[in-house]
Amino acid sequence: MLQMGAQVSRSEIVKDKLKDQAGALTPAERLLSDVLLRDYPMSGLQSITKLAEAAGVSTPTVIRLARKLGFDGFPEMQAALRDEASAQIKKPILKREGWPQGRKDSPAFRNFAEAVFDNLNQTIERLDPATFDAVAEVLADTQRSIFLLGGRITRSNADYFFNHLQIIRPGVTLLSQSPNVWPQYLIDMGPCSVLVIFDIRRYETDLARLASLAKERGVVIVLFTDQWGSPISRTADHVINALVEVPSSWDSTLAINLIVEALIAAIQTQRLEQATDRIEALEDMFLSTRIFRK
Amino acid sequence: MLQMGAQVSRSEIVKDKLKDQAGALTPAERLLSDVLLRDYPMSGLQSITKLAEAAGVSTPTVIRLARKLGFDGFPEMQAALRDEASAQIKKPILKREGWPQGRKDSPAFRNFAEAVFDNLNQTIERLDPATFDAVAEVLADTQRSIFLLGGRITRSNADYFFNHLQIIRPGVTLLSQSPNVWPQYLIDMGPCSVLVIFDIRRYETDLARLASLAKERGVVIVLFTDQWGSPISRTADHVINALVEVPSSWDSTLAINLIVEALIAAIQTQRLEQATDRIEALEDMFLSTRIFRK
DNA sequence: CCCCATTTGAAGCATTTGTTACAGAATAAT
DNA sequence: ATTATTCTGTAACAAATGCTTCAAATGGGG
């Protein structure tokens, strides 16, 4: 990975140096400096040969300029340029405002939160809108029946998704954790079924086996996994990768939950009419059972 | 929903190719892809050696990936990345900030994500570090037994917390959803017990009733609730307020999960030694049961 | 006109890079 | 368990890159 200059108060160090030295440059160096500044800092990221050619000078000139600017050699200058470009390009999609002053949070908590924010950002960035749409669509289709299953850690995510889907639409099933009863669910799956699987790090072979069995039956498979990708990625029709790494012994499933919640919102919107009826009916029933209870 | 559109000529060719091929990547290639996407596109502008090192793979793997993406070799891919970076940098800064350019996400998705980020930010800001520490401490104390319970929506959060706590320490119980069996748990609760309750909007009276019964028995009560505060707030010893509102028919429990995950990390660290033993033992047992199964 | 200082590129060299071939490792499939 | 298949790193190689040396330009002052 690129190491971020820790001291990036000014991000355009090379440019400044070029300007400072502008008077002390020789004609050939000036040609070079010109090219360097023309589409700064990218032009400096080519090989020394190409750069020299582009400026119409020789390679030693490039090295001499780099030295004049205080670098050890060309690669060092290039590294500086790369860091600058990296800093410029970094796009905070959704930034968390600087950490509030005077808080006494432990650094650990802080790091944890920062990591989570990074994960969410990157997950959104890597998410293919088309995939999201396709998944939302297939899950909103009431012609299809839906089956959900999570792993050891992700079972809660599956449960959360199930909990909401079940309220929004009919035909939703949460598979039991024990593989020995899966055949009973499998037999009900067909081309009009959707199997939503959650499988992150420490991928579970049982899940993969189930996925391929389901695939054989023509089931549409939606996979939620981590950045590295469960082996089920190959079997699945739609794959959603979420970043899960945080400074902890455990993985964070927040990014997965973000997508799940966004999907719930999308699906709900998509079939607003039917859903509201359904929810009202449910509310009524909840009230009734409450009356039962006391 | 995200709107699909005709393929606009986007500048992020390599990224697209990476996403397209995501399913067909081998594990090592995925490591590499991860590094490539992490600080895209700059990380790909290093030498092949550095890049391979950063990803923890060998240089041939880099070449193989480049070929898989349709490039002739590594330099070709790098040139493509350089062009992309160049194109991005030329854009006015204003255009680069905020939501990434060229994404076809719907405004709905965008709003949702922004709301979630706001929630997380504000939740952290409102969180009293002292409360956090106190809760972490009380939950790390193995002298105490822990009981967890969630509501209709938050049951998954309770389950997630339970799932991890149970691995880290002994004496953790997840209460059933049905109130009629709660007395059986209540009878085991005392001054050395902790009851963790999740109760957000549409506060459930049953939960409140349980809380006060537990309180009478001297149980320490930890409450996760929303920004408005469940009625249990008065009974509880420690209250954690998380923002839950998003543009959806449903509340978002992401902020709650953030705190839960942070707590898990904190607790784990706090009793690292014992926990690791325990986890190793568990791993062994998991392996054994796997053997049973097949 | 010659000398000296400075600038510059050509040529050559060591190093690093990008690539290929191959064999050990890991998986999956009998 | 054994085999076949796929994956992946090591090692050797070729091709550049980055650098050094040195001599040819250049360009003022005497």
Image: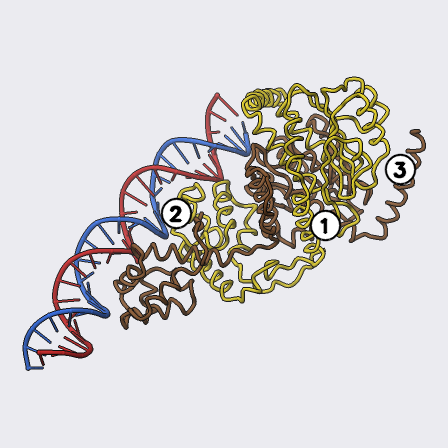
Chain colours: A brown, B yellow, C blue, D red
Q: Secondary structure at mark 2?
A: helix
Q: Secondary structure at mark 3?
A: helix
Which residue corresponds to mark 2? B50
Q: Position of residue B161 (x, y in %)?
A: 68, 31
A49 lies left or right of B231: left
Subunit bearing disc 3 = A
Between B45 and B118, the residue placed more toward the observer is B118
| Res A179 label | none
B235 lies left or right of A262: right
Which residue corresponds to mark 1? A136
Q: Position of residue A110 (x, y in %)?
A: 57, 41
Q: CA distance from mark 3 to mark 1?
A: 27 Å
Q: Secondary structure at mark 1?
A: helix
Between A134 and A162, the residue placed more toward the observer is A162
* Snapshot quadrant of residue B264: top right
Question: In the rendered structure, which amino acid carries the disc numbered 2?
Answer: Lys
Among numbered discs 3 and 1, the one appearing first in the sequence: 1
B249 lies left or right of A230: right
Which residue corresponds to mark 3? A286
Q: Where is the C terminus of chain B found, in terms of image quarters? A: top right
Q: Where is the N terminus of chain B found, in terms of image quarters? A: bottom right
Question: In the rendered structure, which amino acid carries the disc numbered 3?
Answer: Phe
Subunit bearing disc 1 = A
Badge 1 crowding class, 10 Å Cα cut-off, few under 14, some 14 to 19, many 20 or more, is many
Is residue A216 visible in the rendered structure shown here? no
Which mark lies nearer to you, 1 or 2? 2
Badge 2 crowding class, 10 Å Cα cut-off, few under 14, some 14 to 19, many 20 or more, is some
Badge 3 crowding class, 10 Å Cα cut-off, few under 14, some 14 to 19, many 20 or more, is few
